[in-house]
Each structure stands twice: as structure tokens, then as C-alpha cells.
Image (cartoon, rainbow, N blue to C red):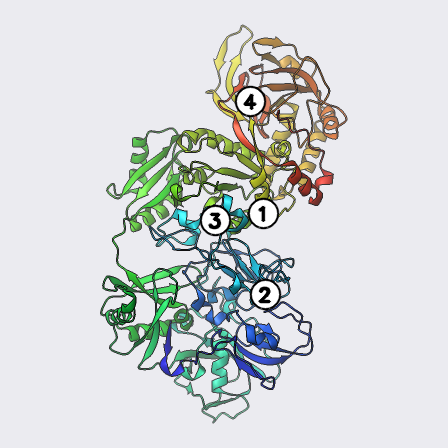
Amino acid sequence: MADCCPAEPEATDSRTASPLAAKSRYKNPVLGHSFRRVTLTKPTYCHHCSDFLWGLLGFLCEVCNFMCHEKCLKTLRSLCSSMAPSAVQVPVAHCFGPDTGKRRMCCVCRKQTEGNAALRCEVCELHVHTDCAIFTCADCRVCHTEGTREQDTFHHHWREGNLASSARCEVCRRSCGSSDVLSGMRCEWCNVTCHAACYLSVTPECTMGRLRGMMLHPSCIRLLSRNFSKMHCYRITEDNGGGHDLDDGGDGDPSAVASKDSQPDYGKQLLKVFDGDDALKRGHFRLVSIVRATRNEEVLGAALNAFYLPDEPQDYQLQEVGGLQRLHSDDVLNRNSGPDNRNSLKDGGDAWLLRHKGCNTEVIKVYRSRPRSGRDYITVSVSEGSTAESVLAEVSKQLGVQGDDMTECDLQEVFMSSKQVQKQTLTPQEKLLEKLQEIRKASLRQMNQTRFYAVKRRNQAVQVSLLIGGLPPMLTKEQYWQLIQDHLTTKSHLVSISHVYASQGAVALQMSCFSEAERVFMLAKDTSVDSKSLWSLVIPDIVHNQISEDVRPLLVLVNPKSGGLKGRELLYSFRKLLNPHQVFDISNGGPLAGLHTFRDLPRFRMLVCGGDGTVGWVLGVLEAVRHKLACREPPVGIVPLGTGNDLARILRWGPGYSGEEAAHILACVEEAEEVLMDRWTILLDAQDIAEDGKENFLEPPKIVHMNNYFGVGIDAELSLDFHLAREDDPDKFTSRFHNKSVYVKVGLQKISATRSLHRELQLHVDGRLVPLPNIEGLIFLNIPSWGSGADLWGSEVDARYRKPSINDGMLEVVGVTGVVHMGQVQSGLRSGIRIAQGTYMRVTLKKAFPVQVDGEPWLQPPGHIIISAAGPKVRMLRKSKHKQKKSASGAKNGRSESCAPSDGVQA
């Protein structure tokens, strides 16, 4: 950013300033606030100390609406929104998405956000109005390092406001949160909260807080992002809000960037003000409300405030759009003057262009490319003859005492847009003063968000990793390479395949050129192979040898389609609490993306947020790629977002997600214990079995894996009808209550049907033919929970059978006689009919029957079904008992669910 020399403010420390009570205005040049005394007409809280403003008087900033006591003016720490770009340490763009209906305060204008007119960053705690978003700067969290650059120390990343009402100050232990105003400070890594007056007393170095043991530290992650947006780097899909074009003014409606207080009071009128040629071309203006007789200097001040510019009005002028009229500081805008007054404005719809007057000498700040202790920038005076080379020479001269060598440096222009940080290296002979005038002419807002950096030249090896999926499965590396060459026309000397996941139809590409990586990334999204669309993801590199021994990172996999909007909110919450590089949306690339990213970590845990089907999907992919992982058996925890959630019940994670805080869920994962669980392989061999015993193959055999249970008959038929109903109208199936009501409706339709399942199939257990009673459904249980928590096996002691367990290597076979029997089991009045217990099952179907595996149903043709153990047991995380009790006491819908069965895990 640059300053005109005549407008250089006197450096007065706000902490020692003592405004007089008699003064109605007070300007803080350091923090950027421009206060005026106001009369309060409704209850108001101080934004500095969060206390109530007693009496009728307060001080209001005319730029950012900061309100405080007179006594608090002496101890202010909060920057005005106009000065926010100057506080950025490392420019990092935000990832904006639509905000929820929760009450939040805008971080720019400090007013309450409302409904659809609000945005939030998907990575940090930034909430803004849609029309305020373009005035935010690139001050998001630094979640990775670019290339080999390392930071000496890792400092807190403070964000003001939107704290919980129960938040306590880390320094003085008093309440610092408020839901009424934007007050208080919070570190977005360790979640330490403080008053604005106290946070500078906190030790600058951040220890990552209580989640340190499961968090990926930013210094351990390498990612050369360059032209990739942060939405691409964090794998955030545009469906989550990535389509907001902030630089283009949202949806293109000029009113979208107008001031919110746009209704003029009596005696006032509105001006349309543009901040540069870019805004004029796009029709994006700000509305400025002025009284009918106002000096131009006051109008200029109001226009600067509308664009959150911290400069002095005397350095600017207003030009009439489409005309030659200019207003000077001594002119008076008189709305009631006659038509012969040259300095009067036409009534209604006045459009003006805010311009910088320009000067022969300016002062710019040149920042260091790497954060260090002491001053972060050097001030340099530039004139008409100043070039980038001469500026660097002056910087080198000023740093000569410290021994810094600037001979191998370039001057880099950095535009800290909230959407994307744009960098441009200036040529050595480029004129700086002309560059500043060019930026200001295009956009004064852009000038306020532009910096200059002295960046050392370095020949850094480019290394970008992409994961390409959607390819045909089970091909060789050579065949995948040929497909990539044919459809993406990659350059062989710049691209290579580093990993092949044949079972998943995916490959990892290593790119040595930014432009080639960007081209392949975008082209893959619009390419199809065998009528199946490809997908592509940018994958960071985790430097596993830099992770401390006491840290066990958590890989979070979230299915946002589960649990209505709850999966979407959990995805957002986990991204804020952890490093977003360890949180994955499995609707975009599946579980493979996360497992590939964590492939070299010798130890990590997993948290799967979804229903039983999602958990089975993740465990299946884990089984398929475990031989490529350094940690082959990562323990898996569950956040239940489905309808039945039977596996989550027996592992004590509850019958369903009921709104627990994400921080509490992570604390439960930290204290959870590891248990083993059996997994089973089901071979489905469809054959037409004739009466003479001859077998004709109907379709190729297929293999599926089972975690919970496998059903044949009436229970699978109900699941199939429910599945078809959900496919016809998926928007209605967004809550567990509605899903269960549909199950009941489907069951009532089947209540009078008669079948004879026991006559149409044969069962062999461990090689022995087992006679079947008169039943309509046959169910094979791996866990002691079925159909949303029912205990189908029962708790009665029987000497013929062992007590069921999820890790005993045995399955329990149970029968049900019909829908009424199933309802009685669900109600706890009866249990199923115990048939057998064993390790190897063989079922022969004489005709087609509905079957289901872990709630996923289909119609199975006649033939053989073989169930056997599937390799090694999987490690699961079971919630500790004291955490379970604490969660149960606060659950909203826990009383309406059936009681959870016993854990089924042998000691």
C-alpha cells in the first residue's frame, strides 16, 4: 500500500491518547477509527469490553460501526475495517460459502448477518454480508507451507468476534463472549479466547491447544498452490458455496454492493459512488447518504468510509460520471440551489467517480517475504523516476546494517483479495509511481489491499500431486498411462504416475509444471471415460518425519449427504477445528482421497461421519488399499448420521447425531478405546438350479463385504421398497424420523402377505445342513444390533450357543416369521428365532429373493451364497463409558430411541 507524503498521519499511540469529554469527534490514526459521539436510543454493548453501555452517550466509528465507552477509547486494540489489510501477516485467501441461519456478526461492518444475504469462510470463523465480502482481505489461516519455506515460530491466528456467550478470557478469566456485538478475540488454531484489551498479553507462540495430539501442523504440509484457488486446495466443491464471484459483485446485481443503510433520512439524499474504472464498467457502486447542504470534504469523507479507505479526504476528488464536473474541498453540495449553480448536483440518481488526486512523491511499504521478528516492512519514498530496481536498492540500503542481501531479490506486487491472492513480479525498470496510479485508477479498494514484497529468486523444483479418479478399475499401470495420454494429452516429460489404485480406478499423478498441472486438473473435470465422468483433486504432501511422536493425526471423512444438512455442518465445523487438509468430503473423490493423502503416516486414526452404508464403504476402500499404507490398520471412529446406525450403537457412539459440538466429538475420539471387529466376505454365485441338479450360470459371481448383518427375505424386501422410494424422491428423506415412518408404512403394506422362505432355500453352517423352521426372513448377525438398535438374538442364556461378540469370528443366524414378529422385536417384546452359530455359511436359493447387506438391498437371482471371514479384523474406536453418559444426558432425541444393546465386545 502507498501513502501520499502530505497525508502522512502523526504516529500517535492510541493507548496513551486521552480524548476530551467535551469533544464530539475523535480520530485514532493508528487503528483507523473515526469516532463521533452519539446519543443512544436502545440498549447497546461496548465492542471493546463487552459490557453494557450505561447512560445515553457512546462513541461510534463512522467507518466500521465500532461502538465503545468513552473510557475504552484509551485502551483500544481492535483495528478498523479500513486498516485490516495492514494487519495481515501472510496473505491467504478465504473460501466463501453460504452462511446458515445462526445469528452472527459481520466482521466488516460489525452488524448482524441475516439469512441468505450472508457468507462464511469454510476454513475460518469469518462471517460477512454478501456486499461486505469484497472489503475483506486475505487473512485466512495458514494451513500449509509453500514448497520448502519454513516458519521460525508458529503464532496465534486471532479472529475478532462471534464467540460463544460462555467464552472466558484466558488472561483475566472474565466473560469475553457476546451474541449481541462483535467483541472478543479467539485464536483459530488453539481456540483460546480473550478480551480485545487482553489478547496481546498472551504468549505469541501457539501450541495448537487441546487438539494438538490429533492435528496436522501446517509446517508438516507442503503444497505448491500457485494458480489453484483455495477451494481447489481444500477440495471444497462449488455446491458448498464456492461459486460466489466476489470480485464480480456476487450475482451481478449492482444493488448487491450498495451500502446496507441505503434509505435516506429526511433532509438527506443518496449518491452513487464508484471507486474506479473497473467498478464503473461493471456497474458496481456504493450508496452514500449526505445532507442537502454539505461541504465536499465531508462528502469525500463519507465516500471513503463507504469503501473502507483509511486515507485523508483532501487527497481525493469526485468526478461526475459522464461529465467534466469536479468537486473541490471548498465546494458546498446544495440540493436546494437553482439550475444555474454549477456546483449543485441533479436530484436523484447522481453518479460520481471517486479519484485520487495524485502527487509527485509517495511512500510505499515493502514487506519481507518471510515473517520475522521486528519490523515486517521497510518504508521507501518513490518519485517519478523510481523503478523496482531502485526501490530494492533502497531497501537493501536500509537493511544493510542487518546484513540482508537484496541483490537476488525481485519486487512483487501482491493483491490480497479475499477470494484469491494474486501475485505479479515487477520488471526491474518498471516505474513504481505509474504502477500505483494505474492500480488506483482501476480500483481504490484494490489499492488498499495491495502490497509490495521483496522476494528472493530461487530455482525451486515444482512438484504438484493430482489424484485422478473415475477410470475403469483393475487395469495395469501401462493401461492407465495410455488412458491418461489419450484423454488428457499429457506431456510425458512433465507428468508421471506415482501411485496406482486399480481396485478404485484411480491414479496419482506427479507434475513438474504448474501450467500443465492446472490444465490437466481442469480438463479432467470435463472428461469422460467409458461414459463415466472423471474427477480430479489437488493432494498435499505430508512430511511425516516432522510430526511429533506424541501426535496421532485424525483423518476425518464426512458424507455431507447423510443426516440432511447435519453432514454439511459437521464438515464445516471440523474444517474450522482441525487443519482443513485432514478433513475430506467423500462425496468428492470418495474415501480414497483421504487415505492417499495419509498414505505415508506411520500412525493415524480415522473418523467417519455417516450412516452404516458410509462406514461400510470406507472400510471396504481401506481393505482394498491397506497394502499401500504405512499404517495398515488405523482405528476407525463413527459419527452416526444415518437412520439405523447399528454399528455406532454397539460402539457407544449413540443412536444418531443429535447436534453435539464438534469439539466434544473430537474429545471423545481422543479418549476412545480400540476394539477389534470381524468383517465377512459374501460370495454371490447366481445360478439357475434345475430339478435334475444341473446348474446354469445366470451372471458372473460377485463379492461384497459385510460389517453388520446380511438378510434374506422379508427384512430385505422392506429395505428394498424403502430404497426404491428414496430413489424416487430423495429430497424427502432428510431426517431419521421421516425415514422410520416410511419403514413403518412399507411394513404395514406387507403385514398380510404369506410366504414360505424355509421351503425355497437351504442353509449349511460349517458344512452341516441346518433344518429351518417356518420363517419369512433369515438374518446373519455380526453385531448384536439390528434394525435401529433391536436385539434380535436376545439375551437369554442357552447352553447350545456362545455369547455373541463382534470379534469372536462367528456369525449368529436368526429367523423372523413376518412383519408382526419384526415389530415385536423392534418393540423389545420378543427376540428372533435362534437357528445356528458358526464361522462358514452356505445358502442355496431356489428362486430370486430380496437380500440386503448392511442396509443396502437388491434382488438376488437363484444360486449359492457363501459367507466366510474376510482377512484380518478391523480396528474400531469405542467411546469411553463416562463420555457416553455425559453425551446421553444432553442428547435431544435419546429418549425416543430404543435402548442400545450390549457392546458385544469380549474383554
Q: Residue at x 54, y 20 (%)?
A: 861
Q: CA distance from mark 3 to mark 2?
A: 25 Å
The total number of labels drawn is 4
Circle 2 SS class = loop
Q: Residue at x 62, y 80 (%)?
A: 38
Circle 3 SS class = loop
Residue 17 seen in the figure: yes
Label located before the other in sequence (1 or 2): 2
Query: How many residues crowd mark 4 within 10 Å: few (<14), some (14–19), many (20+)?
Result: some
The reply, left or right, for residue 473 in relation to residue 382 is right
Residue tagged 3:
579
Q: Quadrant of residue 501?
A: top left
Circles 1, 4 touching at the beta carbon (< 8 Å): no
Query: For residue 860, which numbered disc appears in the image?
Result: 4
Q: CA distance from mark 3 to mark 1?
A: 14 Å
Circles 1, 2 touching at the beta carbon (< 8 Å): no
Q: Amino acid at mark 1?
A: Ala
Q: Amino acid at mark 4?
A: Gln
Q: Residue at x 61, y 76 (%)?
A: 71
Residue tagged 2:
183
Task: Residue 349 in the image: state x and y as whole percent.
Answer: 51, 79
Query: How many residues crowd mark 3 within 10 Å: few (<14), some (14–19), many (20+)?
Result: many
Q: Is residue 340 above or below residue 486?
A: below
Q: Which tag is nearer the camera, tag 3 or tag 4?
A: 3
Residue tagged 1:
662
Label located before the other in sequence (2 or 4): 2
Q: Is residue 42 above or below residue 905?
A: below
List the single residue furthest toward the top. 692
Circles 2, 4 touching at the beta carbon (< 8 Å): no
Circles 3, 2 touching at the beta carbon (< 8 Å): no
Task: Residue 897 in the image: state x and y as whole percent.
Answer: 71, 37
